[in-house]
Amino acid sequence: MGENQEFLDMYHSFTNKKLLVVGAGGIGCELLKTLVLSGFADIEVIDMDTIEVTNLNRQFLFRKEHVGLSKAKVAVESVSVLNPNVKLVYYCKPIQSREFNVNYFKKFTAVLNCLDNIGKSCKRKARSYVNRMCLICHLPLIDGGSLGRKGQVDVIIRNITECFDCHKHSPSHDYPSCTIRNTPTEPAHCVIWAQHLFNQLFGEVNSDQDVSPESLVTGEEFEATPQVQPLTSIISLQDLAKNHNYDPEVIIKKLFVNDIEYLRTMEKLWEGRQPPTPLNLRWFRIGLDESLQGTEQKDWESRDQNVWTLKECFKVAVSCLAVLKERAKTAPLIWQKQLPVGLCQLL
């Protein structure tokens, strides 16, 4: 009896600690479920991402009706059903936000990082930030990550173990789809988005490479201003393009007006950063009606060294769409670096 009581006292002392979980994706979902079922009673969760269709096969706290909603919010609501007595708080914000400073971290007994691939640039920055906060506050940090079938976990304790920034991490050439389609910050992100766009329009459709922020768009929703709400009907960008015979205005409106308006409705996503601005289609129509003032006569070498006007971009996009549409009629196209330079400009 004495040993049992001693164990119970130790258990309650352990589970009464206040924990911070950073990330509510694949690892975060599993960890939150385990923590709640283990009896931990005070947990806060931070994740700035929203749920995508491609998350549903492995992030089991989410369902189809949750697509477009905050990962942190839905994860907290889902695990609270497992233990209604647990105190759960969530934030749909970047971990580097000013409010998550030293004073905020000092509230916790331990921090658990669930930030997916250790090689991704945006994840490295977040990991490094959490690492520094934990070192300053003398907090133990359990850092977990995954890449394909591989996984890693490190325990970081000040003056006892190496910290995250003690050794150099090899950069990964994989980019998170949510960054590519929602918040690109590097030139490489834009290049990857363009390659994904080529495949979505003319190649084999891969849902992991969908360039639209919501991935789910119906014909009627296409005409209306998008709203952040669960969507039910699925139509790919390629189907949308085919249904409109690859009408350039329809495609450009989808990518640079509707999708941008949808992104702007995610107010939490733009706290501390500049939201994107939708294109004005009036300039698209003007651009098609007016000449490019000698642009066709420019040699490609000098043209690549200049910033294109919006009219030039529209003209080249329309021309490339027309050529690629015809080529894709016989079989799906595969992006190759050897494509004629004129077609490359679509990217």
Image (cartoon, rainbow, N blue to C red):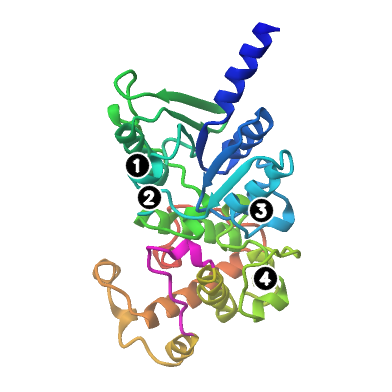
In the rendered structure, which amino acid carries the disc numbered 3? Val
Mark closer to the chain start, 1 or 2: 2
What residue would you read off at disc 2?
Answer: 96
The circle on residue 237 is: none
Q: CA distance from mark 1 to mark 2?
A: 7 Å
Q: Classify the position of the C terminus by image quarter.
A: bottom left
**Residue indicated by mark 3:** 53
Mark 2 nearby-residue class (10 Å; few <14, some 14–19, many ≥20): some
Q: Which mark is residue 129?
A: 1
Look at label 4 and name its amino acid. Leu
Q: CA distance from mark 2 to mark 3?
A: 26 Å
- Do tag 1 and tag 2 residues touch (Cβ < 8 Å)? yes
| CB atoms of marks 4 and 1 within 8 Å | no
SS class of the residue under badge 3? helix
Q: Pick the residue in front: 234 or 151.
A: 151
Q: Are marks 3 and 4 in contact (CB under 8 Å)?
A: no
- Helix or strand or loop: what does disc 2 sit on? loop
Specify the amino acid type for callout 1. Tyr
Alpha carbon of mark 3 to alpha carbon of mark 4: how far?
A: 18 Å
Image location (x, y in percent) of residue 252: 53, 76
In which image quadrant can residue 262 be found?
bottom right
Classed neighbour count for the residue bearing mark 4: other residues with Cα under 10 Å, few (<14), some (14–19), many (≥20): many
Q: Position of residue 37 (x, y in %)?
A: 69, 31
